[in-house]
Amino acid sequence: MPRDPEIKEAAVVLECRGIVKRFGGVTAVDGISLEIRAGRVTAILGPSGSGKSTLLRCLNFLEVPDAGKVLFEGVEVHARDRALDGLRSRVGMVFQQFNLFPHMRVWENVALGPRVIRKVPREEARLLSLGLLERVGLSDKADAHPLELSGGQQQRAAIARALAMEPAALLFDEPTSALDPELTGEVLAVMRALAAEGMTMAVVTHEVAFARAVAHEVVLMDAGRVVERGPPSQVIDAPSNERAARFFSKPGA
């Protein structure tokens, strides 16, 4: 099927080839190949249980694939080797739940990765953290603890934490699924700003309007397989696949 020519021109940052992941007798991801290209936003959509989050977790080996390959900047990554350490230090992950340390102040949560992994001195890491919190609209919450923040604020802090490692790409696993509509908007606004700045992103989401507005490529999954992929104007607004047409004809799509 046709692909956006802009996507083809950008360098591949993260790639999977023929990824398979099984849980017992259930095949959650069934032979998927995907390229995440520099400066582009890839939105991964599909019904619940289609394998979207499992695919994303296979990309950084939070789930170890049963078959297939994952490559980061052209180098194949295995479950226990030095390349995996490089991938995890340079590919950030933002989860459905915020996973902030409640006993640490917000700036300390953001600074933790640079301090522990990159050995950045405390004051330098603090200044980095404060700059990133300003970037996500949380400069006034730097000294607060996570439980003093709303869910949307916690998710924005989690995005700042991922940015603190200066990632080559960010993976988002349904980052707004635990939020009410008002808080969802503030998180999506930060993600839109990152996309406008050229951040490489793969986003598992149910937010079709976000995918339509921001993504360069939309990947629609069902039953562990890709059923359609391409630019939003094709996949969302003029799908050629009957399953895709049914999915996007739902109210709210």
Image (cartoon, helix red, strand yellow):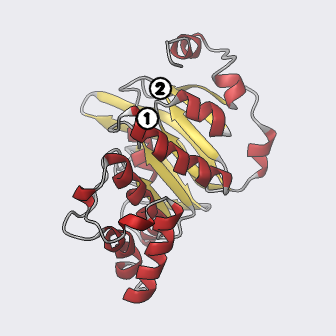
Percent x, y for residue 253?
A: 54, 19
C-beta proximity under 8 Å, tags 2 and 1: yes
Q: Is residue 80 visible in this depiction of the protein?
A: yes
Q: Residue at x 43, y 28 (%)?
A: 224
- Give the alpha-carbon distance from disc 2 to disc 1, as whole Å: 7 Å
Hey, which residue is sitting farthest left in the picture?
Answer: 103
Residue 84 figure quarter: bottom left
Q: Which mark is residue 52?
A: 1
Horizontally, is 167 left or right of 160 in the view? right
Q: Nearer the viewer, residue 252 or 222?
A: 252
Horizontally, is 201 left or right of 153 in the view? right
Which quadrant is home to the N terminus? top right
Q: Which mark is residue 46?
A: 2
Percent x, y for residue 193?
A: 61, 52
Q: Nearer the viewer, residue 37 or 161?
A: 161
- Amino acid, disc 1: Lys
Q: Nearer the viewer, residue 58 or 181?
A: 181
Q: Secondary structure at mark 2?
A: loop
In primary-sequence order, the first of circles 2 and 1 is 2
Q: Is residue 87 visible in this depiction of the protein?
A: no
Q: Is residue 125 above or below residue 1?
A: below
Q: Residue at x 36, y 32 (%)?
A: 28
Percent x, y for residue 192?
A: 59, 47
What is the total number of numbered labels drawn onto the structure image? 2
- Amino acid, disc 2: Gly
Q: Residue at x 28, y 70 (%)?
A: 105
Percent x, y for residue 2?
A: 76, 28
Residue 242 figure quarter: top right
Q: Residues within 10 Å of mark 1 (few under 14, many from 20)?
A: many
Q: Secondary structure at mark 1?
A: helix
Q: Residue at x 59, y 12 (%)?
A: 245
